[in-house]
Amino acid sequence: MTDPGPQLIGTVVPALDTERLRLRPLTTDDLDPVHGYLSRPDVCRFLLHEPRSREQVAESLARAVARTALAADGDGVRLAVIRRDDDQFLGEVVLMVESAAGAGAEIGWVFHPDHAGRGYATEAARTLLDFAFEALNAHRVIARLHPDNEASIRLCRRLGLRQEAHHVGNCWIPDRGVWEDTGVFAILRREWAGG
Ligand SMILES: CC(C)(COP(=O)(O)OP(=O)(O)OC[C@H]1O[C@@H](n2cnc3c(N)ncnc32)[C@H](O)[C@@H]1OP(=O)(O)O)[C@@H](O)C(=O)NCCC(=O)NCCS
């Protein structure tokens, strides 16, 4: 069997088009829309941080735009999700290296509530899964989420990810000063048929 590692590591994540959407690397010009959702308590409820100030979002964007390729475990590329017919900024998805040695990738998503309930997150995540399995030759893709995040769990199930774990009190959230649980969902390359 060939070593699948090199494709997951080092590949530049390009812009990806779907039927309704364009996924493209975030830029510093995206500060307003990204701050628009990352400053909201309802959006951050199940994220690993509290609502962010404009300065905090600007700092995280600066780090994000510096990374367009995956280089090591834990690295992630954040992609803006834009509606193609009117250029509306909807949210973002992220593609991370979970384990280079295991050809494992991780995906995540955050959308503005104004654009919920229309399948945009599903469409964007499906494209990211296609990219992970086809272009990066990933063996397994996971999503980690708070076990109370029902919208995210439904999204995982729509994509065909199965729940593999519920870790109890394993995740320290510095902003909140608490240990939280984590649900782990996963799908293997051989199971993926485009969702
Ligand atoms: C998680 C999150 C992205 C899910 O958003 P969402 O709007 O439920 O997901 P989608 O855009 O895929 O829309 C799916 C919903 O639209 C409906 N829908 C309408 N048209 C659809 C279409 N063409 N295709 C698929 N679903 C469609 C689905 O039935 C589904 O509704 P349901 O969940 O009530 O069954 C969103 O809740 C979010 O950003 N939350 C805050 C951040 C967060 O918690 N991120 C995850 C951290 S792990």
Image: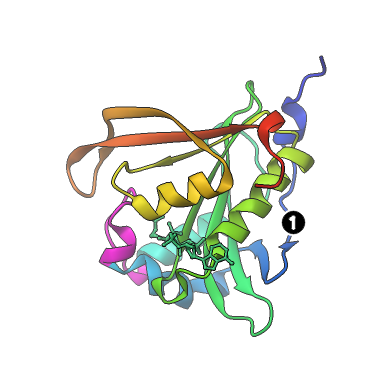
- Find out if the beta carbon at label 1 lies less than 8 Å from the nearest ligand 1 atom: no
Query: Left of 144 or right of it: where is 130?
Result: right
Magenta stretch encompasses residue 45:
yes
x and y percentages locating residue 89 in the rendered image: 55, 75
Query: Left of 41 or right of it: where is 117?
Result: right
x and y percentages locating residue 26 in the rendered image: 59, 64
Q: Is residue 79 above or below residue 28?
A: above
Residue at 35 percent across and 51 percent down: it is 150
Query: Left of 41 or right of it: where is 22?
Result: right
| Image quadrant where residue 146 sits | top left
Per the picture, the main secondary structure of the magenta-coloured stretch is loop
Q: Is residue 184 above or below residue 153?
A: above
Colour style of the rendered protein structure: rainbow
Q: Is residue 190 above or below residue 49?
A: above
| Image quadrant where residue 39 sits | bottom left
| Image quadrant where residue 27 sits | bottom right
x and y percentages locating residue 165 in the rendered image: 39, 27
**Residue sitting at the far left:** 177
In the image, 70 versus 102, the foreground residue is 102
Residue at 58 percent across and 65 percent down: it is 80
x and y percentages locating residue 191 in the rendered image: 67, 32
Residue at 34 percent across and 63 percent down: it is 43
Q: Is residue 79 above or below residue 72?
A: below
Mark 1 Cα within 10 Å, few/some/many (few <14, many 20+)? few
Residue at 42 percent across and 51 percent down: it is 152
Instruction: Assign the N terminus to one quadrant of the image.
Output: top right
Q: Which secondary structure lies at badge 1?
A: loop
Residue that mark 1 sits on: 14
In the image, 152 versus 54, the foreground residue is 152
Magenta stretch encompasses residue 56:
no
**Where are the magenta residues, as a range?**
41-55
